[in-house]
Amino acid sequence: MATTDTEVKELIKREYEHGFVTEIESDTFEPGLNEDVIRRLSELKQEPEFMLEWRLKAYRRWLEMDEPEWAHVDFPKVDYNSISYYSAPKRPEDMPQSLDEVDPELLRTYEKLGIPLHERAKLAGVAVDAVFDSVSVATTFKEPLEKAGVIFCPISEAVQKYPELVKKYLGSVVPAGDNYFAALNSAVFSDGSFVYIPKGVRCPMELSTYFRINAANTGQFERTLIIAEEGSYVSYLEGCTAPMRDENQLHAAVVELVILDDAQIKYSTVQNWYPGDENGKGGIYNFVTKRAACIGKNAKVSWTQVETGSAITWKYPSCVLRGDNSVGEFYSVALTHNYQQADTGTKMIHLGKNTKSTIISKGISAGRSSNAYRGLVKFGPGADGARNFTQCDSLLIGDRCGAHTFPYIESRNKSAIVEHEATTSKVSDEQMFLCRQRGIDPEQAVSMIVNGFCKEVFKELPMEFAVEAGKLLEVSLEGSVG
Amino acid sequence: MLSIKNLHASVNGEEILKGINLEVKAGEVHAIMGPNGSGKSTLSQVLAGNETFEVTAGEVTLNGDNLLDLATEERAREGVFLAFQYPVEIPGVSNLQFLRTAVNAMRKHRGEEEMNAAEFMKLAKEVSKQVDLDPAFLKRGVNEGFSGGEKKRNEIMQALLLQPKLAILDETDSGLDIDALQVVSNGVNALRADDRAILMVTHYQRLLNHIVPDYVHVLAGGKIVKSGGRELALELEERGYGWLGIKDEDTSN
């Protein structure tokens, strides 16, 4: 996609000629959370009654719950009444008017990551570009999807257009009362994506580029629901390698995947939220609940994640393997630097016969960061012949960081088989000396060594994205040597 | 080309090199011999810029440039190459990627265009044949699961790829059987050139039957105690180090 500067300008100009108009809501809620706030939120989104009821029920559950404290992270208490639960999109005149007004440091990072020129402005929040994106990109991708019968829209739109599907599946994998943050999300979710792949359909494209453009500004309580009907397939890519800046400190998202007989969902994430500065100031708290339910037989799900951002990450993409012969996979790279803290891993719940799961987790710690893997592998009484393979590797850079592994295994079936391997290694002085002696820059050397360490996970990412993920690690590791 | 004057270096406060003086001209091959603990490996590491060692006095220049002012990678780009005695493994990083990164770092430094994957693959395959390595090894992790002999051949292959001005070979013969020694020696002989200096560090003289040096120096107690021609190595083989007044714990040769 060789888009030149002039082409972009041309396109922007054209959209203006077409008289594109965006309705901008003008109000932002006062900070604080109560039932009235939820009613107003639901009304503003023109939601059907069932949705409001659902939100209120979740809110009431949330009030009775306590914030979890078991994770290996440390942060001051969040004041939930200091957060505004609805904030109107920024008006174009309040946004930077061109890339010249954007922090040059941010632009430098985009360039290093190889983000296409026409996406940089959008990611940096430049006003004009939003117009360009929403029309040109969306229409290019929407047509083939519609042809295949794939539904791909904001979840707020799905609530109105496909209430039956939403009613049936929303909260079916992550119930509103599942955990503290899931309950909060259920009560106040802002927006997110809805995907429905009909029976036997192989989604004609990776739901990625499109999403990258549209994912911005979905808010701090994102909600995603993906349903793969019998025999269907979809590869979904969430997030973006570009650094995402956001004024909201708390992010509590929920992602639910529903996979029926013989269907498959491949869900890849790159998370690069603002991690705070080198002194540990600022940064996003990313508390996410992601879960897939393989409810049909021979269903398959794979989670692949590359996590480099956020001040605090609390995230365990899980697989409930209910259908016989269903398969769950989890491939993860979590990198922490400076004062970042990550407690991440997965849960594999084997319920059906001959269910299989694989966990490959790579944790990289640099600076003064702390990186923990936490994983649960559970076999129910009916999980005859089920098996799991887990491999957890930690890599330390420097001597002030920490890596921890907390594996939990619960088996209620004698025929289940579990294998667990774990290693901890360091980027050694000898490795660095070898690389530098061959003329390679110290930073490039670290990034090459780290990339080698992550290879097993990167090969699970869509090709183009694997390259970007490699570059992302390089950028994220800047300043970790010397 | 290489000029070392009164070089002193220590590690953890203990002085290992106690005043090394050495001149190596382009086109020459010098062998540094000496018993264990004499400072041979330290000299190689210090020249290449290993930061574990602290240079406390002296001067080292390469074609007039002060090497000691340069970081490890800068020295490498100026043409200093060290073939390691114990090459370290880098799991998951393919040899091909590692070598291409290194070659391109050098090319970039010289203001040349970087090589793309296909061009480099072709070059690497050719060079790997010179040291009798199956091109399939290019896809394996750097030194990962390599035998001792493969590691040493890999080091020489890197020298052939990078075409340094000064090649320092640290105990390149150790742990090689006679066939592997022949292959490695052929590689080193292929490196000999009028515009290149080679510094060979070795405990044993057998390597020098294959790679005939122009000069031989004996290092003991952190100093060069004797220098001579090829015949000095033969004399050492016959008489050991004792006649030079040096104690050698390892007399197994």
Image (cartoon, coloured by chain):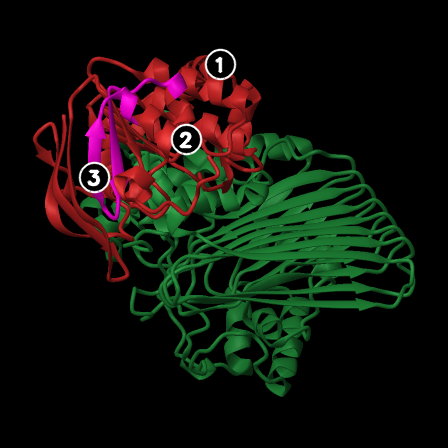
Horizontal side, residue A91 vs residue A269: left or right: left
Q: Badge 2 local density, few (<14 within 10 Å), some, or many (20+)?
A: many
- Say whether residue A75 is visible: yes
Look at 34% across and 48% down and name the residue there.
B37
Q: Mark 2 points at which residue?
A: B172
Look at 39% across and 78% down and name the residue there.
A30
Magenta extent: B209-232
Q: Which of B26 and A77 is in front in this view?
A: B26
Q: What chain letter is assigned to the residue under label 1?
A: B
| SS label for mark 1 | helix
- Whether discs 1 and 3 lie on one chain: the answer is yes
N-term-proximal mark, 1 vs 3: 1
- The spot of residue A59 in percent (x, y) is 61, 79
Q: Mark 3 points at which residue?
A: B225
Q: Mark 1 points at which residue?
A: B129
Q: Nearer the viewer, mark 1 or mark 2?
A: 2
Q: What chain letter is assigned to the residue under label 3?
A: B
- The spot of residue B8 in percent (x, y) is 17, 49
- Badge 2 amino acid: Thr
Q: Colour of chain B?
A: red
Q: Badge 1 local density, few (<14 within 10 Å), some, or many (20+)?
A: few
- Whether discs 3 and 2 lie on one chain: the answer is yes
**What separation in Å lies between label 1 and label 3 (alpha carbons)?**
39 Å
- Vertical side of A94 occupied by A249: above or below: below
In the image, the chain rendered in green is A
- Badge 3 amino acid: Val
N-term-proximal mark, 1 vs 2: 1
Q: Nearer the viewer, residue A469 or B215?
A: B215
Q: Badge 3 local density, few (<14 within 10 Å), some, or many (20+)?
A: some
- Say whether residue B120 is visible: no
